Structure formats: C-alpha cells, structure tokens
Image (cartoon, grey):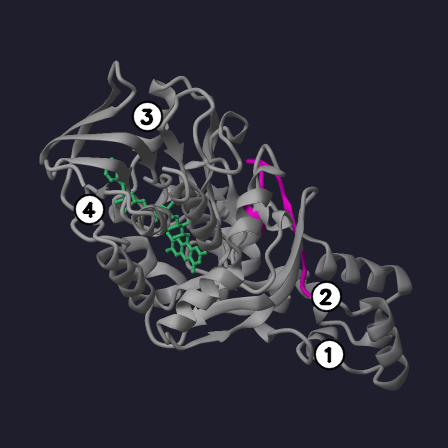
Amino acid sequence: MPANPNESDVLIIGASAAGLMCAIEAGKRGRTVTVLDHANKAGKKILMSGGGRCNFTNTDISAENYISHNPHFCKSALSRYTQWDFIALVNDYRIPYHERDLGKLFCDDSAKAILDMLLAECARVQVRIRLNCEISSLEQTGDGSYGLATSLGSFRSSSCVIASGGLSIPRMCASPFGYRIAAQFGHTLWPTLPGLVPFTLQPDDKHRFAELAGMAVACHVSNARNQFGENVLFTHRGLSGPAILQISSYWHAGEAIIIDLLPGIDVVTFIKDRQATRPNIKLKNLLAEILPKRLIPAVLEQASIDKPLQELSRAHIEKIATQLQQWQIKPNGTEGYRTAEVTLGGVDCNELSSRTMESCKVAGLYFIGEVVDVTGWLGGYNFQWAWSSGWCAGQVV
Ligand SMILES: Cc1cc2nc3c(=O)[nH]c(=O)nc-3n(C[C@H](O)[C@H](O)[C@H](O)COP(=O)(O)OP(=O)(O)OC[C@H]3O[C@@H](n4cnc5c(N)ncnc54)[C@H](O)[C@@H]3O)c2cc1C
C-alpha cells in the first residue's frame, strides 16, 4: 500500500452504486482504493431509491431493457456480473427482499440495508471513502498517473474511475462532473436528457384532468418507439406512474403518447354485447363497471356518455373504442432533472471497452454507471447496470 494516504492505486469519483461496487472489487484484488465524493453521505440515491426500499435488480435482465446509442455495449458487463451475482451478495448479508411485478426485487425493510452492505464490503477490503470533497481539477501527469486537486488536498493514483452519475436530482448532489471530465479527455458525449420522468400537461389538459389527481389506472402506453403495460398515475402536475416514466425515456418533445385505458378488452364487442342485453343503461354507467367513474368524462364527450346504449350506432361505438384505447395526449414537457430518476445520453460507449469500461483514448481512465450512455428501464435495471459496470472496472483497475 502506498505510504501517503492521498496516494492510491485507484481513485474513484462517486461513492454510490457504481463507484462502491468498483471499489469493493478492486479492494478484493489487493489494490489500494480511495473513493472521493462531494456529498456529505455515500450512496444518497441508493437510500432514496425504490421509494426507500431500493429496487436493487430485476430477475429478468437483457440488453433490450436498456437505451443506448450502442445497444450491444451493455451485454458484456451484464453477462459477466449478473443479477444473480448481486442477489447472491444480498443473500450473503441476509437482507430480506421480495419480488414485485415484472421481476422487480425490493428490500423488505429499507434501502439502507443495500448501502450498509456495500459499505461493509468496502470496509472489509480497506477502501478509503472521503466525503465532502470538492474536486477542482483532474489531470494526467507525464508518467500516466492521475492527479486530483480537491478541497481535501491533492490525490494521486495510477488509475481513475469516473462514477459520478448523471444530472438527475441535483439536490441529491448530481453534477455534470463526469461529462466535463469526459470532454476534457477528448471523449464524445451524447446529449443528455431526463429519463424515467413524469410528464407535465398542456394548460387545457391540466385543467381537464385536475380532478383526477391521485388516480392510478392500469394502462398500455405507447409511442412509435416502445410500449409499456403498467399503471398511469394522474398527479397535480401531470402524468406519472410506471408506464409514464417508462415511455418518457422514449419520448421526443412535441410528440403525443397513446394510452390504451382498457388493454386486452375488445371495447366494440363489449359495448355491442351489452347493447343487446342492457339497452337502457347509459354508456357512462356501463363504462364505470370497467373504468374509474371520474375518468370517463375526461376522455369522452358528455353528450356521448349520457346516451343509453340503444342510441349508439356502430360508428359511434367504434369512435368511443378509439377514444378509450388510442387516447392521445401531447405532454407539454417533463418535470426535468428535478424529479427524473435517470439521465439519458452521456459518455459515448464506442470510446470505452465494453469488457473493462476503460477509455479507448486515455489509458487508466474508466467510466462506469449512469455517466455512460446506458440507461435502464424502470425496474432495477439502472442499479444492475451500476453493479455490472462497476464490477467489470473493478477487475482491472
Ligand atoms: C428517486 C430515484 C429513485 C431511483 N430508484 C431506483 C431503483 O429503485 N432501482 C434502480 O435500478 N434505479 C433507481 N434509480 C436510478 C439509480 O439511482 C441510478 O441509476 C444509480 O444510482 C446510478 O448509480 P451511479 O453510481 O452511476 O451514480 P449515482 O448513484 O448518481 O452516484 C454518483 C455519485 O457521484 C457523486 N458526485 C457527483 N458529482 C460529483 C462531483 N462533482 N464531485 C464528487 N462527487 C460527485 C454524487 O454525490 C454521488 O454520490 C433511482 C433514481 C432516483 C433519482
């Protein structure tokens, strides 16, 4: 171990999911590791994740669950350190967890258990973690080593890992540090955008849906690029819920999203069948049997829903089915990085080794986790990317 505490084999910027995983693995190999973070606490996003219960991985993980300009890049890391490897670690620490819908694994009690596990592993292999550390510059010196100037003094190392995450949730200490370093060392950056983020609505829609705040509906939401069958949640500000967060990562400003409020139901047949058996029931009362009552006037015109079924023509029923199943909403925008769970875009994968995460341009420089142009779906995929990419770098730094 280098004698000077500010000298180490490996410097990692970012003491959260990816950085801590990398530190553990490098420490296990006998490397001296220092992790620097400007926050006053390690792993703030881990603590706030999954509503405080950390959706730490998913039982079903593949490259299709990730968005990247190079969709193949994540495959190597995800296959070398899989969800089962992380689950084994969680089991070793006897952390109780449960599976929710679509393979999502959550802690039974608190996300703190995951952070405590990572910190315990770090302590076991003597990783040094320095918090409240403002970094002013990072340079590579003539001998290829790295020098950092920080508020806690100068640090030196033979390799440097950027695990500083994306731009989401600035109040949780997110910063553009990683992108700035990537640009400084000649890396290409894909434009960044908030992902897994609620939509805001056009003023008219906001007014029209105001009464629906708090309502969750199981829907199928789609656009030209993807589709998700999960809940949509109406909020005071706009639309949220898992289906909306998922599609937001595939949304381009100005586009409409399409919501099927009755997925799996043949609405025309449903109404036609009841037209024969219950001709006097009003459409709104029939629909209230399969949809929340308050939602109906927000989607369909009052004149239609007040009609008894016997007064509806086939063409009218078809129009109603289209309105309910291809409900088009054009969001005004998103809530932005203030509430986004992730940041799309970032360090171009084509300039990194998919096996080690090392820069192809600068020896000894690594990028892992969310700062890289790999963004997962909602459901534990982002943490798995952080674990997998951190693990890969940890084998070689
Ligand atoms: C509200 C919320 C809930 C989420 N829930 C889940 C979930 O349940 N499951 C899931 O898979 N994903 C979830 N995510 C996404 C997940 O948290 C991130 O994808 C993941 O934390 C990325 O890990 P990372 O280590 O790359 O970056 P981060 O966790 O963002 O960590 C980056 C670290 O770098 C530090 N840093 C940043 N800038 C600097 C700087 N200039 N100097 C020094 N240090 C710096 C930060 O303080 C931070 O500690 C959630 C995100 C949010 C915001």
Q: What residue type is labelled 4?
A: Ala
Q: Earlier in the sequence, mark 2 or mark 1?
A: 2
Q: Which amino acid does label 3 sit on?
A: Ile
Mark 2 to mark 3 CA distance (whole Å): 46 Å
Q: Is residue 260 left or right of residue 395?
A: right
Q: In which quarter of the image is residue 389?
A: top left
Vertically, is 383 above or below 285? above
Label 4 CA crowd tier, 10 Å (few <14, some 14–19, many 20+): some
Label 1 CA crowd tier, 10 Å (few <14, some 14–19, many 20+): some
Q: Residue 276: tell me if it is visible.
A: yes
In the picture, the quarter occupied by the N terminus is top left
Residue beneath disc 4: 39
Residue beneath disc 3: 181
What secondary structure is marked by label 1? Answer: helix
Vertically, is 202 above or below 348? below
Residue beneath disc 2: 263
Residue beneath disc 1: 286
Determine if the C-beta at disc 4 is less than 8 A from ligand 1.
Answer: yes
Magenta highlight on residue 132: no
Q: Earlier in the sequence, mark 2 or mark 3?
A: 3
Q: Is residue 78 left or right of residue 13?
A: right
Q: Nearer the viewer, mark 3 or mark 1?
A: 3
